Amino acid sequence: MSIPTEQDQQEAKEALAFIRRTMESASTFTAVSGWGLIASGIVALVAAWLAWMRANPAELQIWIPAAAVSVVIATSANAIKARGSNTPLWSGVMQRIVWVMAPSLIAGALLTFALEGQGASQLLPGMWLALYGAGVTAGGTLSIRAIRWMGIAFLVLGATALARPDLGLAMLAVGFGGLHVTVGSDIVWRHGG
C-alpha cells in the first residue's frame, strides 16, 4: 500500500469538486428567468388595475388572458436564459418541476370554472393564489431557494384572500404582481438574469 502524494490528493479533490458541481446542477433548475418573472408581474399589475377599473376582482375575461400571456412570457424568457447558460430547458429537473406543479395548476383551472358556475367568484383570488403557491412551493424544491419562498408567500396571500375575500384583488396585485417583480429582480441580481 502506498501513501498518496500531494498530486494524488489534489487530483482527488478536483475530481470530488467536479462530481459535486455535476450533482448540484443535475438536482436544481437554475434557468428561471428573473426578467420573465418581472414581465409576468407587470402583466399581473395591469390585469389587477383593469379588474379594479371594472370593480370585479376575479374578472375571468381579464385574468385568463393575463395568465396565458404570462405563461408565454415566462416560458420564452426561461428558454432564452437556459440557452444563454447552456442549460437544457427540458432537462430531467424541468420535467419534474412541471410534473409537481401541474396538479395544483390543473386543480386551479377546474375550480375556477366550478366556483364561477356556483356564483362563488369572490373565492377565486384566494384559491388562485393558494394553489399557485402550492405548485410553486413544490416546484421550488427543485429550483433556487427564492422560488420556494415565493411559493410560501403565495400560500399566505391565498389564505388571507380566502379569509378576507374583500382583499382578494389587493392580494392578487401583491402576489402575482409584486412578488413576481420582487423575486424576479432578486434573480436578475443574484443569478444573472
Image: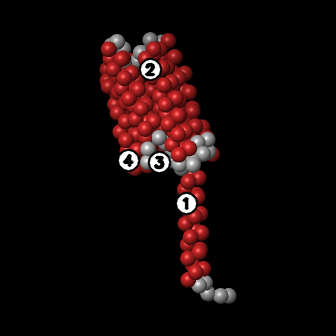
Toward the viewer: 56 or 185? 185
Please tell me which residue is depicted at 56% across the width and 44% down the height of the picture. Answer: 83
The image shows residue 172 at horizontal and vertical percentages of 37, 26
The image shows residue 184 at horizontal and vertical percentages of 40, 40
- On screen, 119 above or below 80? above
The amino acid sitting under disc 4 is Trp
- On screen, 22 above or below 105? below
Lower position in the chain sequence, tag 2 or tag 1: 1
Toward the viewer: 30 or 123? 30
Question: Which type of secondary structure does the marked residue at label 3 adopt?
Answer: loop
Q: In whole angstroms, how far apart are the C-alphas of marks 2 and 1?
A: 40 Å
* Mark 2 or 1, closer to the camera: 1
Lower position in the chain sequence, tag 3 or tag 2: 2
* Mark 3 or 1, closer to the camera: 1
Please tell me which residue is depicted at 61% across the width and 41% down the height of the picture. Answer: 90
| Model colouring | secondary structure
* Mark 3 or 4, closer to the camera: 4
Name the residue carrying label 4: 189
Q: In whole angstroms, how far apart are the C-alphas of marks 3 and 1?
A: 15 Å
Please tell me which residue is depicted at 52% across the width and 40% down the height of the picture. Answer: 80
The amino acid sitting under disc 3 is Ile
Q: In whole angstroms, how far apart are the C-alphas of marks 3 and 4?
A: 13 Å
The amino acid sitting under disc 1 is Arg
Report the number of numbered marks: 4
Name the residue carrying label 1: 21
- On screen, 56 above or below 27? above
Name the residue carrying label 2: 63
Q: Are marks 1 and 4 in contact (CB under 8 Å)?
A: no
Name the residue carrying label 3: 144
